[in-house]
Every structure is written in C-alpha cells, then in structure tokens.
Image: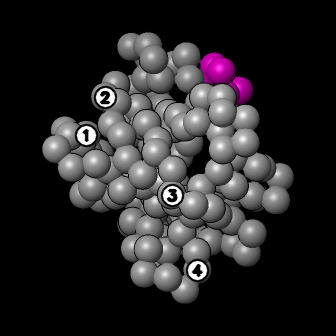
Amino acid sequence: MGSRLALAILHSPLRVLLDPGICELAYTGRRTGRRVRLPVIYAKAGDTVAILSGASDTKTWWRNFTTPQPVWLRIRANTVTGIAVLARPGTTGFARALAIYKARFPDLSYEPGDRLIAVALEPGQEHPDHA
C-alpha cells in the first residue's frame, strides 16, 4: 500500500482498517526543513511509542532522529506530540523500545540493519492506547 493511500485512510473513518498498528508520524526534516508525513507501524506502552524501520539500508527517514527531534503522531484519530530519537543497541532506551515492540509483535526478529525509534510522548496529553 502506498504512503499517500495509507495516510488518507488514517485520516478517514476507514482508519479502523489500519489502526491499531499503523499511525502517522510527522516531523520536520533536519536538512530540508520540510514537514514529512509517513505511515509507520508502532507499538505503545505508557508514554513511550516504539517505531521500527526494518530494512533501513533502503530507507533514509530514520536518519532524522540521530539526535532528538520533535514529532507529531496521529494515533487513533488523536494527535499527540513527543520527542523521537534513534534508540541505539546497548542502551537502556533501545532495550525498553525493543521490549515494547516485541510485546506488541511477538514474532518480531530484530535484524542487523533495522533501526528502532523511541518516542517519549509529552506529559499532560491524552495518550490513546491500544484496544
């Protein structure tokens, strides 16, 4: 499914076809300064969202998060904000994000070259949870 089609569905009443499981990630590109919107598969626990970029050698969007960056997530028709950063293997953030993702997707096998983004949702927002 193309990104534009997935985003259109996420903004329509048909979003139940994709959600929970797929949300919209929006951020400002570090180099371009343009707003980027992508459908991503996510897992959430508490105020942390984990996003896996599989086969990352074929993608570049995750590179925007080598340093912490503000993001907007549209989860279940709600927009929440947070700070996203690339979780690096061997760190506590990586272990927590991977545990969140594996709890949601138990058949996941994290492969070398995959990238994991951890989003700390800002406090004081209503954080939609999985059903």
Count the labels in the image: 4
Label 3 or label 1, whichever comes before in sequence order: 3
Question: Which mark is drawn over residue 78?
Answer: 2
Residue at 39% of width from left, 13% of height from top? 13
Query: Residue 98: x percent and y percent?
Result: 48, 71
Query: Residue 58: x percent and y percent?
Result: 83, 52
Q: Is residue 32 left or right of residue 130?
A: right
For mark 1, what is the residue? Answer: 128
Residues in magenta? Answer: 2-6
State the image quarter where residue 93 is shown: bottom left
Q: Tell me whether circle 3 and circle 4 mark residues in contact (CB < 8 Å).
A: no
Q: How is the image coloured?
A: one colour
Callout 4 amino acid:
Pro
For mark 3, what is the residue? Answer: 68
Callout 3 amino acid:
Pro
Q: Considering depth in this image, is 131 or 122 the residue closer to the camera? A: 122
Estimate the spatial distance between the alpha carbons at disc 4 and disc 2, rounded to whole Å. 30 Å
Quadrant of the rendering where the N terminus is positioned: top right
Label 3 or label 4, whichever comes before in sequence order: 3
